[in-house]
Structure formats: C-alpha cells, structure tokens
Amino acid sequence: DDDKKQKLDIGIWKKILKIMIRNKKDIIILLIAVFVNSLIDISFPLMNSYAIEHYFGENPDYSTRFIFCIMYFIMAVMMGVCVWLFIRCAAKVEESTTYEIRRQTFDRLQKLSFSYYDTTSSGWVMARMTSDTRRLASIVSWGVVDVLWGVVLMVGTLLVTIVINWRLSIVLLVIVHVLYSFL
C-alpha cells in the first residue's frame, strides 16, 4: 500500500533514461526505423488511392501498373525491414536496460544492512529484482516506439490531409479538439 501512495518521482525516470541512452547506436537505429515505418504507413493509403483512380476508374490506364507494383513491393519490403529493425533494437535496449538496472540494484542491495533483510521479505526483494525491472525496461523501450510511431503517424496524416483537402483537415482538427476536450 505504501508503494501505491508514493508520487511520481521524475528523478528515477531520469536515471532510467540515462541507463537506456547508453545504447546510442540501437536507439538511433530504432528511432530511424520507427520514423521510416510511420512514413511508409502514411504512404500506403496514397498508393491505394492512386491505384483506384488510375486502374479502376471510368478510363483505366494500365501503363504504370508495372512501376506501381514494383513500388508497392519495395514499400512492403522496406516496412518489413523497418519492423524487424525496431523490434530487434527495442529488444536489445530493453535487455541491456534490464541488465543494468538489476546490476545497480544488486550493488545497492549488497550495501544495505542486515536489519533491512530482517524486516523485508526476500520474496518482495526478488520480485523487485526480476519482474519490476523487466517491466520498467519494457515500458521505456517499447514506450519510445509507441510514442514516436503514433506522433509521426498523426502529424504525417494531418499533413497529407492538409495537402489533399485543407477544408476537410480543419473540420477534422475541430472534431478532434472537441473530442479531446471531453477526455
């Protein structure tokens, strides 16, 4: 119960982010892969719109179908590579963050007095060392993926909507604002 009553400590999250940032290469690859994947997500509906207009309209023009199929295939492969990359990098960041948190926790536990272990159950300590560290690392690494993917997807979709029909995008923004105000 005491754990649930504690306020959010920003200092702890800063320490976790410092641990996570040690994997700069994986984080950079992760961010790029998520960004590119989001852009590809945005472009698929545009490609489908092009196909519907040119190949299924009143006067179909099949002169670009080969190039269209190649582009669609390349985008699908790129999307698959990006998903593989960000899953791989996020998993690496999660594992190394978990390891480092556990290592630091173990070092701290070694410095505690024996009276701490007399008053604290070993099961509680083990739960904190195993499942809680895993959850923290998972929240941080996969949270980056989810937040970045969502933000790029929303902003990109809004920009595409503005380019296609700016009046519709204004209506969309008003509706989203009204819906958000009810939350």
Image: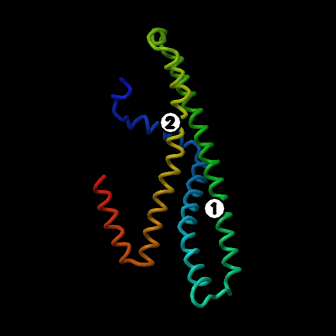
Q: Residue at x 36, y 69 (%)?
A: 172
Amino acid at the residue labelled 2? Leu
Task: Using the numbered discs, state the Cα–Cα distance from disc 2 to disc 1 in whole angstroms.
Answer: 28 Å
Q: Residue at x 58, y 58 (%)?
A: 32
- Label for residue 30? none
Is 85 positioned to the left or the right of 53 in the image?
Answer: right
Where residue 183 appears, x then y in whole percent? 31, 52
Is 49 positioned to the left or the right of 159 in the image?
Answer: right
- How many numbered discs? 2
Where residue 9 appears, x then y in whole percent? 37, 34
Q: Is residue 108 above or below residue 26?
A: above
- Res 134 → quadrant: top right
Which residue bears the numbered disc 2?
136
Where residue 113 appears, x then y in whole percent? 47, 11
Report helix, strand or loop for mark 1.
helix
Is 155 positioned to the left or the right of 19 in the image?
Answer: left
Could you tell me which quadrant the N terminus lies in?
Answer: top left
Which residue bears the numbered disc 1?
79
Comparing 107 with 40, the one in front is 40
Q: Is residue 85 above or below residue 15?
A: below
Comparing 23 with 54, the one in front is 54
Where residue 120 appears, x then y in whole percent? 46, 14
Q: Dot 2: few (<14), some (14–19), or many (≥20) neighbours within 10 Å?
A: some
Report helix, strand or loop for mark 2.
helix
- Res 138 → quadrant: top right
